[in-house]
Structure formats: C-alpha cells, structure tokens
Image: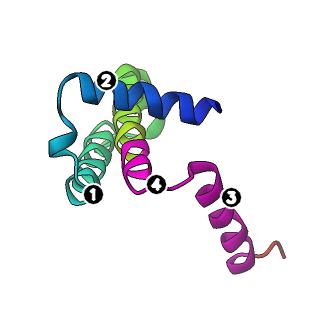
Amino acid sequence: MSEIQSLISAINEFRDERNWRQYHNPKDLAISISIEAAELLEDFQWIDSEEALKKNQENIREEIADVLIYSLMLCSDLELDVKEIVEEKIVKNGRKYPVE
C-alpha cells in the first residue's frame, strides 16, 4: 500500500468511526476544501509571508492538513488515483507552460 493510500485509509477510518461519511458528498467536500483554503489565507492576510510564518506556523500547518484531508477524501470518494491525477496535471502544465 502506498503512503498516499495509507493516509486515505487512515482518514476514511477516522471518518467512518464517527459516521461522518453521510455528510461528505462531493459537493460538500469541495466546499470544505474552499473554506479550509480560505482559513489558510487568513493566516497571511495583511502581513508578509515571513511574519505570517513566524506568528501562525502551527495554524498554517493545521489548515494545510485540513485542505489535504478533504482533498484526499474527495479523491477517494470519486475513486481518483491521487498520484495519477497529479502526474497527469504536471504533464499538462508542462505542455501549457514550456521551459523557454
């Protein structure tokens, strides 16, 4: 089992133990990703990156984790292979933005 799949399994186990899957449809997971990303942005609002990292490092870590957790749950629920879709996007971006 890959490290990513192991993470997804741990996330899904945590969710299933609490019977939360019923609330985690694709639309609501996408909304949750956006909300958590906005919370991450709040840590950087009105200050430069260096100050934000100094003042908010723990919360930044937690918000990044939340974004990743919801993203991995969504991939799992949609039966998407995380490694595959990321690699495909890198290739696509490489064609769109070639090194000059």
Toward the viewer: 21 or 54?
A: 21
- The span from disc 2 to disc 4 (Cα, nearest Å) is 18 Å
Say if the magenta span includes residue 55. Answer: no
Residue topped by disc 1: 26
Does the image show residue 60? no
Residue topped by disc 2: 14
- Which numbered mark, 2 or 3, is in the foreground of this view? 2
- The span from disc 4 to disc 3 (Cα, nearest Å) is 16 Å
21 left or right of 56 in image: left
Say if the magenta span includes residue 84. Answer: yes
Q: Which residues are magenta?
A: 72-97
- The span from disc 4 to disc 1 (Cα, nearest Å) is 11 Å
- The span from disc 3 to disc 1 (Cα, nearest Å) is 22 Å
The amino acid type found where label 4 is placed reads Glu
Residue 46, image x and y in percent? 29, 44
**Dot 2: what SS?**
helix
Asked if labels 2 and 1 touch by Cβ distance under 8 angstroms, the answer is: no
Asked if labels 3 and 2 touch by Cβ distance under 8 angstroms, the answer is: no
Earlier in the chain: of badge 4 and badge 1, it is 1
- The span from disc 2 to disc 3 (Cα, nearest Å) is 28 Å
Question: Which residue is found at the position 26% from the left and 51% from the top?
Answer: 29
Quarter holding the C terminus? bottom right
Residue topped by disc 4: 79
**Dot 4: what SS?**
loop
Residue topped by disc 3: 87
Mark 4 neighbour class, 10 Å CA radius: few under 14, some 14 to 19, many 20 or more: few
Toward the viewer: 59 or 10?
A: 10
The amino acid type found where label 1 is placed reads Pro
The amino acid type found where label 3 is placed reads Glu
Residue 86, image x and y in percent? 61, 56
